[in-house]
Image: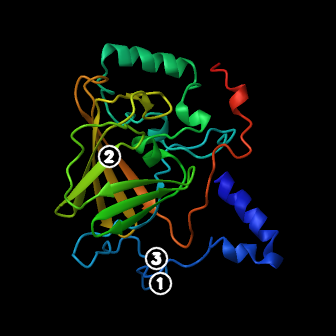
Amino acid sequence: MKKRILVAFVAAASIASGAAEAQWLHYPTPRVPMTPGGSPDLNAPAPRTPDGKPDLSGIWEIEHNRPCPPEGCADMEVGQEFMDIGWSLKTGLPYQPWARDLVKQRVAQNGKDDPASRCLPGGVVKMHTTPLFRKIVQLPELVIVLYERNATYRQIFTDGRPLPAEIGLPSENGFSTGKWEGDTLVVQTTGFHDGLWLDRSGNPLTDAATLTERFRRPNYGRLEIELTVDDPKAYTAPWTVKLTQSIKLDTELLDYICLENEKDMAHVSGK
């Protein structure tokens, strides 16, 4: 990933000042299960919290399922779901007519109006697929997700509180509550801003949407997230996709501030 390589170069050039150690890029992750040969055992059982729940904590990255073109990736190596969240669905997304027309228009314009291209927040689904790391911190009554992109966060309350009955201040992340069903954390989110983009193709999310996420950690090295979008304004039926993420060891989050030294926005034309 270009950003991480550049940061490593700066750190290497600053060893005399101790900057390399301060970056914590190679600090060993504690309590990693090991194979008899001494390498991380990613197929080992998932860790568990004192109350017996699977512990989702860790630094996670996207599945790299979209190879770069022959000329190389333009910036970061994005996955298929970043470009089209519904790419794995054989029949595609069940659009309302207006939403189908809008996506065609956005694709034809090369996604030039994507809020993320203007460094605005991407929302829950897009943050799952953005090719920057995220850290999950699991507490007894709260799950926190920290994102490298724009050094942002998300809160998932697991203390039994209901979703808000009325939404006075909608947001990109909405309001999230979760509960455990066996070894699966089921999260429901409402209260989204109208007009969010789910991906680079511009598949829409409206303020009528309810997002259901099912988080599973089947082993130490793998996180599965099943997403169900129920948005009757934009789609004729709910639809579900599955994301897979991998643990990242011996590293840390590095702030990635989108607007820092940003020079591309003025050249976005949609052609």
Q: Position of residue 139 (x, y in %)?
A: 33, 69
Q: Position of residue 181 (x, y in %)?
A: 16, 59
- Label 1 amino acid? Gly
Does residue 214 lie above or below 16 as drawn? Answer: above
State the residue at coordinates (42%, 39%). Answer: 172
Q: Secondary structure at mark 3?
A: loop
Mark 2 vs 1: CB contact within 8 A: no
Q: Nearer the viewer, mark 3 or mark 1?
A: 3
**Structural distance between the alpha carbons of marks 2 and 1:** 45 Å
Q: Nearer the viewer, mark 2 or mark 3?
A: 2
State the residue at coordinates (38%, 53%). Answer: 244
Q: Position of residue 42 (x, y in %)?
A: 41, 71
Which callout, 2 or 1, points at the residue further toward the start of the chain? Answer: 1
State the residue at coordinates (73%, 57%). Answer: 6
Does residue 268 lie above or below 2 as drawn? Answer: above
What is the number of the mark on residue 37?
Answer: 1
Q: Quadrant of residue 267?
A: top right
Q: Nearer the viewer, residue 172 or 79?
A: 172
Would residue 138 be found to the left or right of residue 74 on screen? Answer: left
Q: Secondary structure at mark 1?
A: loop
Which callout, 2 or 3, points at the residue further toward the start of the chain? Answer: 3
- Residue furthest left as drawn: 182
**Structural distance between the alpha carbons of marks 3 and 1:** 9 Å
Q: Nearer the viewer, residue 204 or 221?
A: 204
Would residue 139 be found to the left or right of residue 10 on screen? Answer: left
**Structural distance between the alpha carbons of marks 2 and 3:** 36 Å
Would residue 92 be found to the left or right of residue 159 on screen? Answer: right
Please name the residue that numbered disc 2 is placed on.
Answer: 175
Q: Quadrant of the C terminus?
A: top right
What is the number of the mark on residue 40?
Answer: 3
Q: Nearer the viewer, residue 180 or 201?
A: 180
